[in-house]
Each structure stands twice: as structure tokens, then as C-alpha cells.
Image: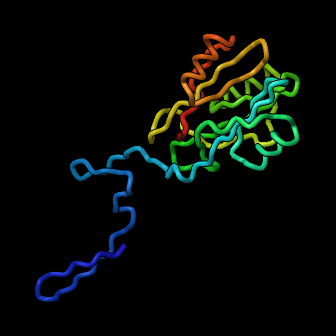
Amino acid sequence: MRLFLILPGFFVFSITVPLSATVPKNETTVNGTSKQNTYCPDPRRASPFLRAHHFGRADSLYTTDPNEHEWFVSKLGYTNMGFTGHIFNYKEGPYTYPLYRLWNPRLTDHFYTTDDYEAKTYQREYGYINDTRSIAGYVYKQERCNSVPLYRAYRVASAHHLYTTDYSEWTRAIRHQGYHYEGIVAYVHW
């Protein structure tokens, strides 16, 4: 990067500063040294995490692909349930992680997790397989950049996982609809 310094008397000095010497947008300096701040990708690059539910099968699909969502609704009998937050289609900086998407054809249940070990355990122990899109998108593992929790609950009677950013929906499912608490699976943009 080239900087120009103009001094009184019309003297122009030009110096070249390597880009590595500049402070990136998301860093601050403390006593002249660079300190990493939270990197926040532009949330406008995130896609709606579309939601569809099949009441007969007790399965919910979550996807960022509007064509896939429409196909499940128009061809497979799922009901459009809107969206539950926004996630990134690609890795955005150092703080986004894959949200794995698995499918169990016997239980007709989609399963989502950011935990690689949990994904492998569900494949090994419970018969889940990688879905056509083994990664649903990229999310945060902890709260950052004005994100909100993506809650998960499980109902044994119908072998159904519920994912929602709506705390009231989540607690209502646990208190009144037979779901079990499974915590926060990720953090997403609203």
C-alpha cells in the first residue's frame, strides 16, 4: 500500500507500507501491538435457513437451497414452515464451522450438528448417513457477531429432531410436546 504525505511548501513524500503492516478492519491496536478482535463476516452474505416439515413422517428439513425446499414441499408432501435464521453457504473467516446434515431413512429423520464426533457417532451407532448435502451450511459454535442460538430438541416417540431459533417454541416443545432437551447446536444470524 502506498501512502502519500504532503508537507507545507508542496513537498510530496511517498512511502510504501506492506499490507501486513496495516491493521485489518477487525483488529485493534493496544500499545502499538495488534490484538485480534472478533471477525464478523457480513451477515448479508448469509442465506435463509429454510424449514419444511412433514407431519405424517414427523421429519423436518432445513436447507439454504430454495429449489430443494420447494421440491420437498411440492413433491414430497412437506409443509413450508418459513425459515429459522440465516447461515452461510461457504466458510466465512476463522469462526464459522460446518453444520453437518445427516439422514436416517429408517427413522425418516434429518439430523444437524457442528460436532464432527457426534456426526460420526450418529452414523456408527444410530444408522444415520450423509445426506445429499452433507454440509447444510456454516455457522458459529459460540455466540458472536450478534448471532442467536439454534436450539435442538428430540422427541423419542416420533424420532424427530426440532431445530429453532425461537426460544418459546423450543421450551413449549420440551414442556408440553414430549421433546427432550438437547441444547444449542449452533449460533446463526437472525
Residue 47 pos. (x, y %): 62, 48
In the image, what residue occupies the spot 63% across and 24% down? 152
Q: To which quarter of the image does residue 167 belong? A: top right
Where is residue 188? Give x, y as percent.
55, 38
Q: Looking at the image, which is closer to me, 96 or 164? A: 164
Q: How is the image coloured?
A: rainbow
Q: Is residue 128 visible?
A: no
172 over 133 or under it: above or below: above
Residue drawn at (68%, 13%) of the image: 177
Where, by quadrant of the figure, is residue 61 drawn? Answer: top right
Task: Name the image quarter holding residue 5.
Answer: bottom left
Question: Which one is in front, 145 or 25?
Answer: 145
Residue 84 sits above or below residue 88 on the image: above
Q: In which quadrant will I find the N terminus?
A: bottom left
Q: Which residue is depicted at the point 62% across and 18% down?
A: 182
Q: Is residue 155 left or right of residue 172?
A: right
What percent of the width, then of the height, locates residue 62? 71, 37
Horizontal side, residue 93 vs residue 53: left or right: left
